[in-house]
Image: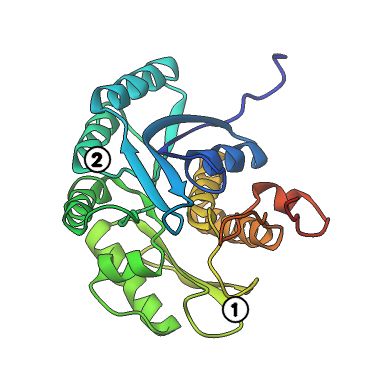
Amino acid sequence: MSQNTPSPAITLTIAGSEATGGAGAQADLKTFQELGVFGITALTCIVSFDPKDNWNHRFVPVDAQVISDQLEAVQTCYSGQLNTVKLGMMGTPTTINTVATALKNQEWKNVVLDPVLICKGQEPGAALDTDEALKANLLPLATFVTPNHFEAESLSGMTINTVDDLKEAARKIHEVSGAVVLAKGGVRLEGADAVDVYYDGETLEVLSEPKVGEVAVSGAGCSLAAAVAAELAKGATPLEAAKTAKKFVTEGIRHRVSSNAPFDALWQGGAATGGAPVQAG
């Protein structure tokens, strides 16, 4: 690389693999690439949709030592260069504890938590244990958190039916975490617009874009948090990162990819194209 060419910001995702490519670490890395940062990943689990079981998740955790080994390699390789991490699906309390321990081995400027609380296919008891471990061990480390409608209800302890509810939930989540919050209403709140609420303890701003369909798209949450992380890694303010991520995801949904699954996948390249939505086959 030329002496005059700046190195890209290095951005880590700690997340699960989702083989069909719409979500998980695959979505994160594609988002990082589109937004001009050098993406690296440590895998926490392998998730495979099961077409024989209503496309529910088949979930296999990565061994804790293997997760620890990946993070040791990453943190040693990029010591002094890596200060931004995006946290995606963990899946088990053991994984959460392993990741939290590794994160504490260095200082971080940006820890973006996508608080994935439920994995379809998990037993309810195991899911609850994972939720509690995430709230206890990862939420306190986060500098920026991006809960969806369900996750915002869980983290705030309140029911969210309106934009005003979402605003109050964002305030409550900030109070318990100290993190900047981007609470996502998405398609789950009534109205023509997909509304998210940004709150950093001082500034409260409603981010709104016209809805693209009325059904959630695979990878939207992963890509939003990854886009926030990428923008923060490049030096954007939290509010600037949130606004860029919102527009990035909206275009990705607009240019979504269809398949034989009963859901579409966000296309991270959507923001860079002026073409029509891509259809499979």
Q: Which residue corresponds to the image point at 67% horizontal and 54% vertical from the top-left?
A: 257
Q: Please tell me how crowded label 2 is: few (under 14), some (14-19), or many (20+) other residues with Cα within 10 Å.
A: many
Q: Position of residue 235 (x, y in %)?
A: 55, 42
Q: Secondary structure at mark 2?
A: helix
Q: Is residue 59 above or below residue 102?
A: below
Q: Which residue is mark 1?
A: 193
Q: Please tell me how crowded label 1 is: few (under 14), some (14-19), or many (20+) other residues with Cα within 10 Å.
A: some
Q: Quadrant of residue 87?
A: top left
Q: Quadrant of the N terminus?
A: top right
Residue 26 horizontal side relative to residue 97, left or right: right
Residue 133 horizontal side relative to residue 154, left or right: left
Residue 200 vs residue 223, the one in the foreground: 223
Q: Quadrant of residue 29?
A: top right
Q: Quadrant of residue 46?
A: top left
Q: Is residue 204 above or below residue 121?
A: below
Q: Which residue corresponds to the image point at 27% horizontal and 29% vertical from the top-left?
A: 102
Q: Secondary structure at mark 1?
A: strand
Q: Which residue corresponds to the image point at 55% horizontal and 43% vertical from the top-left?
A: 20
Residue 1 vs residue 69, the one in the foreground: 69
Residue type at mark 1 is Asp
Residue 65 horizontal side relative to residue 206, left or right: left
Q: Which residue is mark 2?
A: 96
* CA–CA distance in space, label 2 to label 1: 34 Å
